[in-house]
Image (cartoon, coloured by chain):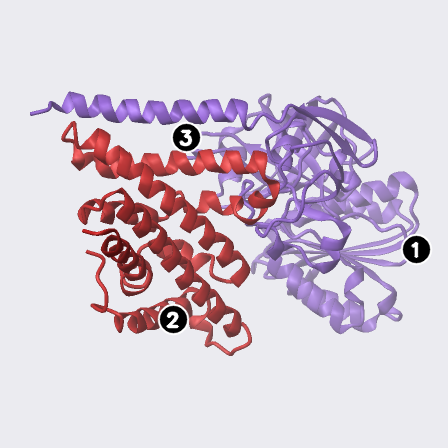
Chain colours: A red, B purple
Amino acid sequence: MTITTYALHLLVILFASIFTENILLARFLGMCSFLSVSRQVKTALGLGIAVVFVMTCTVVLDWLAFQYVLKPFAIEYLRYIIFIIIIAAFVQFIEMVIERYSPVLYQNLGIFLPLITVNCAILGASLFMVIREYNLGEGVVFGLGSGIGWMLAILAMAGIREKLNNTYIPRGLQGPGITLILAGLMALAFIGFTGVLTSK
Amino acid sequence: MISPIVAVVIISSIGGFLAAILVFAERVISNYGEVKININNGEKKSIVRGGASLLETLVAEKLFIPSACGGRGTCGYCKVKVLEGGGSLLPTEEPFLDKTERTQGYRLSCQVKLRQDISIEIPAELLTIHEYACRCERIKDLTYDIKEFALKLIDPKEIKYIPGQYVQVLAPVYEGNPEEVYRAYSISSDPADNTSIELIIRRVSQGICTTYLFDHLKEGQDLKINGPYGKFYLRDTQAPMIFMAGGSGIAPIKCILHHMKNSGIKRKAVFFFGVNTTKDLFLIDEIGQFEKVLHDFKFIPVVAQPEENSTWHGTTGWVTTAVEEFLKKTPDIDKYECYLCGSPGMIDAGVKIFKNYGIPEDRHYYDKFA
């Protein structure tokens, strides 16, 4: 594979993971924080950036752990446990670092970190990386793309919900109800992208 | 084949390695050293370890900031005014603070982390809130489901409170109750004695704290309370007053009546006390005595549904109806102050009636915690 085709291949993975295989709207991972933190565009953006950052970094860490620890000892079946503790520890660690050294960044990003320790999209991205047998480069691009895709989805939802504040919504549908319906409609729209690109 | 032992060893070592990194990071990175807290412009100063939230630190300093969610930033009760050193407002606090509060510097103390010297302002009454160890001296049956508990203060030995305020009793862990809880009860005793207090408590079926108090607590045993809390106390005016209470809601009003007697307050007052049946009546003679010693006080017990064979000669019907009758025939009713204590339903009904008869809401006083 020449360098140009490889770059093109990475670009395809990036776009596929953002749009056609959006981790939230096509795979329905990371729903919890998607529903609960999508009330304001500002907070959604903060959480989104935190997800992009953590997802990219943990995919790398999990790839390393998988290739150099789990595979050599043939204990790949333990990847769920290992990945989740790596993610949890990484998030904790990063939170402490940011809090100490960059109050501004902590202000905008750090406070969301505890929320995403248990975001299943993060674990999902690492597990997809294993299933699809990505190399490190592909893994990074996939993690980045999935994060951006998640962020776009939550931003879109937050934008819609801010508009909804000025609209009449039947009482029984207020809050999570209407949000789930919206998520369903957005997912339907994203189905239109299916098969246009694949990240395999 | 690799044995399961290897898998266990590897998982444990990865876990241990990560834990070690975190412990190390916590020691080195999250070590903020000592910081100074200056409360209410020098009224109280303390030096504490930085790194924890302001709420946790204040609670550890024995300052009881109200909080219901345990510091997760979801209840919005733990507001304090941060004058300097609190950093800027976090998005997690925004939903709980309106514009004026933000400009005045209010913050949720559970979200403010102590990283530097800080100066804060908290309501003066919070500084007087303490935890008290006390001994249960006497338990007296008032009715079939209401008891009076007399508590002697051991440490600290004296309590300072405004008549009408309440304390929180700690129900410890007992069989059937896995965790400690606090419940609020008004002080009913004569405030002249500041070394002991009395509480009038109705048994709540399945209630965690009342089950403890009624079934587990014995005379001579120790228990913990904290307080005092609440804005239910006599306002410093000359306005005539209506007291309205149901059942054990009589407690803070009894305390206020003692206080009026002690301080020679000569305001006009009428007290409507509502119960369901004659066997729910209690303390009628004791409260009736105040009619003789107070300047202008009338006590009107009201029984909703007296038993058929009872000898009850007083007012019958709902207490709200009796109050309404009084409001109808009293001139200058809009000058009155209203003090209510009882179930939330009774308070709501009372507030509605008082409003209808022209007593503005800023003169309705109650603590709704039942």
* Vertical side of A99 occupied by A19: above or below: below
Viewer-closest of B52 and B267: B52
Marks 2 and 1, how far apart in space? Answer: 60 Å
Reading the image, the residue beneath label 2 is A182
Q: Tell me the kind of residue under disc 2.
A: Leu
Are labels 3 and 2 on one chain? no
Residue B339 pos. (x, y %): 76, 55
Q: Give the letter of the chain under mark 1.
A: B
Residue B328 pos. (x, y %): 79, 73
**Badge 2 vs badge 1, beta-carbon distance below 8 Å:** no
Left or right of residue B34, residue A178 in this image: left
Badge 3 density bin: few <14, some 14–19, many ≥20, Cα 10 Å: few
* Vertical side of B226 occupied by B294: above or below: below
* Vertical side of B162 occupied by B16: above or below: above
- Whether residue A130 is visible, yes or no, is yes
Q: Tell me the kind of residue under disc 3.
A: Glu
Q: Could you tell me which secondary element the residue under label 3 belongs to?
A: loop
Q: Could you tell me which secondary element the residue under label 2 belongs to?
A: helix
Viewer-closest of A3 and B211: A3
Reading the image, the residue beneath label 3 is B175
